[in-house]
Image (tube, grey):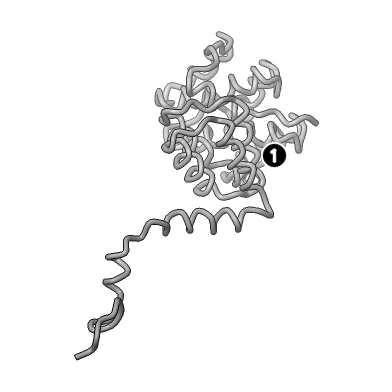
Amino acid sequence: MRKVALVTSFFLLVGGALAQTLPDDLLSLLQANPWIPEFLLERASLFLEAALVNGALSVEEAKQFLETLHWPELGLEEIGFAVRALELALIALSMGSATVTEVLDRLSQAVEEGILGPLASETKALSGLPGLASSLLKLAVPLNPELWNQIENLAAAKVPLGLIGHTVRELAKSGVDTAEIAQALSELTPPGRAQVREHLRAQENFGTSESEEEEKVPPGKGKGGKKK
């Protein structure tokens, strides 16, 4: 099954690159729960819209996801869990490792057990992407869809999100274009990950002043000094 870049689309929706066109009946179903805060409603809407835009599921299937969560009846203490479970379920679907029916079954199991269960383990590598996206969207250099896709694939390959974020931010600050950022990101994929980390450490250590080095020299030694 072709992988649908659901998380990438979520980034673009947050950045305003896609129009918000969630069907009225689906939006009404989301709003049927009186306890959902505005920020969680927006988050759930964005994930569902990204899935619809990319063809990961139909409107009717999206309604099934909400019904599986018993959406309208969820209480104030449950709604946060439900939104997170919905996100993880949609990300798992986008990875192409299971059908809609299989993901729905596992979502139902997670709801019954009161935990995220297998969904959490399968999507752990991607769970921090929304936070990374929020920080990268603030950069002066706009990241194109291809770069977002590359970032998502790196996260799925278990390249540390901190390393990805550091690489993009440092290159953006130096004024390079997106092609150079893409090239640097390509070096982060295993097995080159360790070498890149060493390269970043070397960059951080480069430029240590001579005076700083002299401070490390014991009194009376170095630079021709004589011990008295």
Residue 66 location in percent, x, y?
A: 60, 25
Residue 105 location in percent, x, y?
A: 72, 36
Residue 128, can we see it?
yes
Kind of residue at disc 1: Arg
Q: Is residue 71 above or below residue 129?
A: above
Check the image and name the residue furthest to the front: 224
Local secondary structure at mark 1: helix
* Residue depicted at 68% across the width and 52% down the height: 190
Check the image and name the residue furthest to the top: 24
Which quarter shows the N terminus?
top right
Check the image and name the residue furthest to the right: 1
Q: Count all numbered tags in the image, as a single digit.
A: 1
* Residue depicted at 67% across the width and 37% down the height: 92
* Residue depicted at 59% across the width and 22% down the height: 48
Q: Is residue 226 above or below residue 163?
A: below
Residue 11 location in percent, x, y?
A: 53, 27
Q: Say which of 69 and 143 sits in front.
A: 143
Q: Which residue is mark 1?
A: 106
Q: Is residue 69 above or below residue 161?
A: above
Residue 7, can we see it?
no
Q: Is residue 200 above or below residue 176?
A: below
Q: Say which of 27 and 156 sits in front.
A: 156
Q: Say which of 188 and 49 sits in front.
A: 188
Q: Say which of 117 and 179 sits in front.
A: 179
Check the image and name the residue furthest to the left: 228
Which quarter shows the C terminus?
bottom left
* Residue depicted at 45% across the width and 42% down the height: 170
The local crowd at label 1, few if under 14, some if 14 to 19, many if 20 or more residues have their Cα within 10 Å, is some
